[in-house]
Image (cartoon, rainbow, N blue to C red):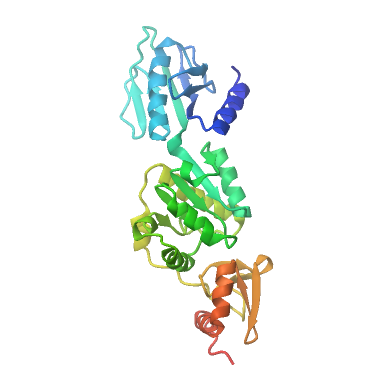
Amino acid sequence: MTNEELHDLARELNGRGEPFALVTVVRAVAPTSAYPGAQAIVLADGTLQGWVGGGCVLDVIVEAAKGAIEKGEPKLVRISNEEVYDEEDVQHYAMSCASSGSVELFIQPNSLRSALCVLGRTPAADEARFLADRLRIRLTDRPDDAPVVLVATQGQGDEEALEAALRSPARQVLMIASRRKADRLQAVMKTRGISDAQLERLQAPAGPDAGAKTPGEIALVAIAGVLASLRGRDTLQERRAEPAASPALRTERGTSSTEGLFVNPVCGMTVSVAHALHVENHAGVSFYFCCDGCWRTFLGDPSKYAAIHQKSAGLGSAG
């Protein structure tokens, strides 16, 4: 099979939700029949399609690929009789062929353990799906089918999506939201019967604080959090220990220090003035909101959140 045919097969398998691993030769030292760029697909039962070398390589690669599929973790495999130093994250096997030679192969699994469900129809959600596809993370529309769920609703059905994610068996739920907004949503979840144990699986913000603003940047940060979860990196306790970020200071009424941005006083999230979902005027100041929930909360006690805005902006009391 050509590499193009293999990629077509990979898309077909991904569409069916069938686990597999894509194996790519990244280095070959003669004498060996393998060559850099050669690829093969290994199914969970050990069936191999494509070409990555002869019999001296295949048995090792099939077993290594099956292990990668089972764990949902990529591997770099070296098959060689060369004297080499031990390297972290490199699995070394002896070359059984008398002719020797060396081959290094990268195994990228697409397994049930590396599946992701992205909830939301926002630009950030679309970007997250694109990035996940590029990383060959299997995508599913059902939270019950994925070990990791990313909630990227950003104000469009936040509560319903988060509840569905937390009621699923997913081992971790990540949400694109500020900590303040996440705290408010957790309180709402408790009124809906979500337990503390279920809430323990929630990570919000979804990824590291990188100052992301655009949908693409926000999705990139979120996918970094998804990848850490899929690779078994437990970042929840570390993130809970981090101090909450201070709200951005404004240089004029209603805007942040970055022109065109406004820090929502309800959840603390930075909102694009041009793309705000709701705009509300109170005491001569325009307030911009990223979601229905924050807007409704503000309307319930506008003076309270106007005071938070004034304090964080250092503007003094409202007239």
In this view, the residue in front, 294 or 129, is 294
Whole-percent x, y for residue 79 in the image: 38, 19
Residue positioned most to the top: 98
Residue positioned most to the front: 193
Q: Which image quadrant: the N terminus?
A: top right
Q: Quadrant of residue 86?
A: top left
Whole-percent x, y for residue 232 in the image: 37, 43
Work out whether 298 lies above or below 141: below
Q: Is residue 303 left or right of residue 241?
A: right
Work out whether 282 lies above or below 228: below
In this view, the residue in front, 278 or 105, is 278
- Which residue lies at the image location 62% right of the left edge and 53% below the top edge? 121
Whole-percent x, y for residue 230 in the image: 42, 43
Q: Which image quadrant: the C terminus?
A: bottom right
- Which residue lies at the image location 31% right of the left edge and 21% below the top edge? 83
Whole-percent x, y for residue 151 in the image: 52, 54
For the question of whether residue 34 can be seen, the reply is yes
Q: Is residue 30 left or right of residue 96?
A: right
For the question of whether residue 211 can be seen, the reply is no
